[in-house]
Image (tube, helix red, strand yellow):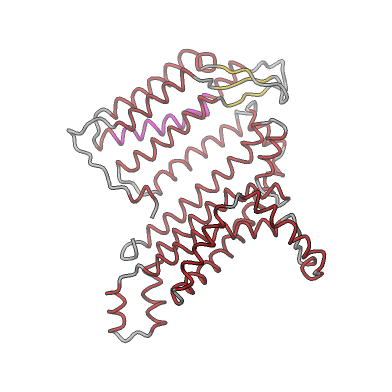
């Protein structure tokens, strides 16, 4: 169960006090719109961009529209009831849908047609507003008691609109230019990233489940196993890669079979070992807790029906524990998606390649080109596995 799902559903009475969360978030957005640069304009990829505020980027009509929408969101939060929360959700979706059109307007105002290499960058104010809108979406999901699938459907629709705008009309956007220059590399990097995560999580699920079953059978293993797994979590990822480099290089040089299998001090082997090491703790912990917390009365009833131990496990204990097991897989996968980015430093490929190349070249748009797909992958996996766990939860371990 995620933290959001553990929170109680808030009351929606008409006499309620203003929703402080939404009011505060609206104030933050208003401050970001007027206090931070909305976009930046650079004559080429090398030169640092010059920031532009909301008035320069959108003109007074666009600035006024943005401010009025945020004020409307704050005003709706002062009278919290189901109708106003639904209207607030509509305002949030409308702002999200209008944001790419704001970039189009900014490009029209700021980009000089005489500079073919000019590019429009996304400013701090834009990112702050986007982040705060996502927080508003989470708050409204809780207030309206929506399933986690609804926000993801909203974001999918908005994301499709953004993609169409970027493809058709935002050719001057720096992020779009970086993508068009490296689209094939990005596709390969996404594939490498997904393969690394899939293999690491699959190994972690198998090893984590076996270890949890052994801990249930032999209670003495529990303390030592959790101590080791907790210790592995404290080792920084770069340090773990460094520790693995020498022994794996030695094995590759002295054991021909391993060398033929591709084992070496750099590349996929140390990346997979490190990812599995970091993934084992959440997998083992959730599996162990899920299997242990099945009601004793339920198991006793199954025994009274004449079920053998193996039947009780496969037909009673495992189905009831499955929602929590899936939560473990969800946590493990999301964690692995983020950690795999660091594996690019040791030649494992993946989206981290763009992040570190961008940092080395001081090209923040290249960094975003690697970071945004990681974020999208994590959100998709979290939504899919979370929705599956929710669907299986009734009657199982909560």
Residue 159, above or below 25: below
Location of residue 192 in the rendering, given as x and y in whole percent from the top left corner: 67, 53
Residue 65, above or below 314: above
Q: In which quarter of the image is residue 199?
A: bottom right
Residue 266, above or below 43: below
Q: Quadrant of residue 326?
A: bottom left
State the residue in front, 124 or 133. 124
Residue 332, above or below 150: below
Counting labels gives 0
Position of the N terminus by quadrant:
bottom left
State the residue in front, 139 or 259. 259
Position of the C terminus by quadrant:
bottom left
State the residue in front, 375 or 183. 375
Residue range corresponding to the magenta coloring:
85-102
Which residue corresponds to the image point at 69% horizontal and 30% vertical from the top-left? 362
Which residue corresponds to the image point at 75% horizontal and 58% vertical from the top-left? 246
Which residue corresponds to the image point at 79% horizontal and 65% vertical from the top-left? 259
Location of residue 8 in the rendering, given as x and y in whole percent from the top left corner: 28, 47
State the residue in front, 110 or 212. 212
Q: Quadrant of residue 132?
A: top left
Quick check: 162 left or right of 50?
left
Location of residue 345 in the rendering, given as x and y in whole percent from the top left corner: 70, 47
Does 101 lie within the magenta span?
A: yes
Location of residue 242 in the rendering, given as x and y in whole percent from the top left corner: 70, 52
Most common SS among magenta residues: helix
Does 378 lie within the magenta span?
A: no
């Amino acid at each position: 169960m995620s933290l959001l799902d553990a929170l109680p559903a808030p009351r929606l009475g008409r006499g309620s006090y203003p929703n402080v969360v939404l009011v505060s978030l609206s104030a933050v957005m208003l401050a970001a719109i007027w206090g931070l640069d909305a976009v930046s304009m650079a004559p080429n990829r090398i030169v640092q961009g010059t920031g532009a505020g909301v008035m320069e980027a959108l003109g007074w009509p666009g600035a006024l529209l943005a401010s009025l929408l945020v004020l409307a969101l704050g005003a709706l939060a002062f009278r919290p009831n189901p109708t106003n929360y639904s209207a607030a959700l509509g305002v949030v979706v409308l702002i999200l849908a209008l944001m790419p059109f704001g970039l189009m307007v900014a490009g029209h105002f700021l980009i000089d047609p005489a500079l073919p290499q000019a590019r429009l960058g996304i400013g701090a104010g834009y990112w702050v507003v986007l982040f705060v809108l996502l927080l508003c979406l989470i708050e409204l999901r809780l207030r309206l008691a929506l399933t986690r699938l609804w926000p993801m459907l909203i974001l999918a629709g908005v994301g499709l609109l953004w993609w169409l705008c970027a493809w058709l009309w935002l050719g001057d956007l720096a992020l779009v230019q970086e993508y068009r220059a490296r689209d094939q590399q990005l596709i390969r990097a996404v594939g490498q990233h997904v393969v690394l995560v899939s293999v690491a999580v699959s190994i972690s699920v198998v090893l984590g489940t076996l270890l949890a079953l052994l801990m249930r059978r032999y209670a003495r293993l529990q303390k030592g196993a959790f101590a080791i797994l907790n210790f592995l979590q404290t080792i920084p990822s770069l340090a773990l890669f460094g520790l693995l480099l020498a022994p794996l290089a030695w094995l590759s040089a002295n054991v021909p079979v391993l060398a033929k299998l591709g084992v070496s001090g750099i590349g996929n082997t140390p990346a997979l070992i490190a990812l599995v090491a970091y993934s084992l703790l959440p997998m083992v912990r959730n599996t162990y807790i899920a299997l242990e917390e099945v009601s004793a009365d339920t198991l006793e009833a199954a025994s009274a029906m004449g079920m053998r131990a193996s039947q009780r496990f496969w037909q009673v204990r495992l189905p009831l524990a499955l929602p929590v097991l899936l939560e473990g897989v969800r946590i493990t996968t999301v964690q692995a998606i983020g950690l795999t980015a660091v594996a690019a430093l040791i030649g494992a490929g993946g989206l981290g390649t763009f992040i570190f190349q961008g940092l080395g070249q001081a090209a923040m748009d290249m960094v975003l080109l690697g970071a945004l797909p990681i974020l999208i992958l994590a959100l998709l996996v979290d939504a899919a596995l979370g929705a599956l766990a929710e669907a299986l939860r009734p009657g199982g371990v909560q």
